[in-house]
Amino acid sequence: MITKELIARINELSRKKRSSGLSEDERIEQQALRREYLAGIREQIRNMLEQVEIIDTPLEQESTMHVKEVAFSLRPSHKLH
């Protein structure tokens, strides 16, 4: 779950990394927090997609835009930047 505290700590570690560098423990913490943040984003997207309702209407209706296919991956990326 993404909280203000989580984002604040991620930002704090990011600023410290740019200014003076991180200790090994801080680097490990930063990676774990980023993974937690990304998992929260993926969960939000999944929840949003579960709420999507697809309505199939005849193509004659000019005011309706039809999308044939949408694809994207919710698999976690192994790269952390």
Image: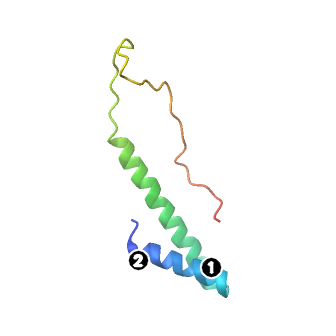
- Name the foreground residue: 1 vs 57: 57
The residue to which callout 2 is attached is: 5
Q: In the drawing, does residue 12 fall left or right of residue 40?
A: right
Residue at position x 46%, y 26% from top?
A: 67
**Amino acid type, mark 2:** Glu
Q: Judging from the image, what secondary structure is the residue with disc 1 in?
A: helix
Answer above or below: position of 53 versus 10. Answer: above
x 48%, y 79%: residue: 9
Residue that label 1 marks: 27
Cα distance, mark 2 to mark 1? Answer: 18 Å
Residue 22 in view, yes or no: no
Q: How is the image coloured?
A: rainbow
State the image coordinates of residue 3 (x, y, percent, origin top left): 38, 70
Quadrant that contains the N terminus: bottom left
Q: Dividing the picture into quarters, in which one does residue 59 lie?
A: top left
Q: Position of residue 14 (x, y in %)?
A: 59, 77
- In the rendered image, residue 43, in percent from the top left (x then y), is placed at 42, 54
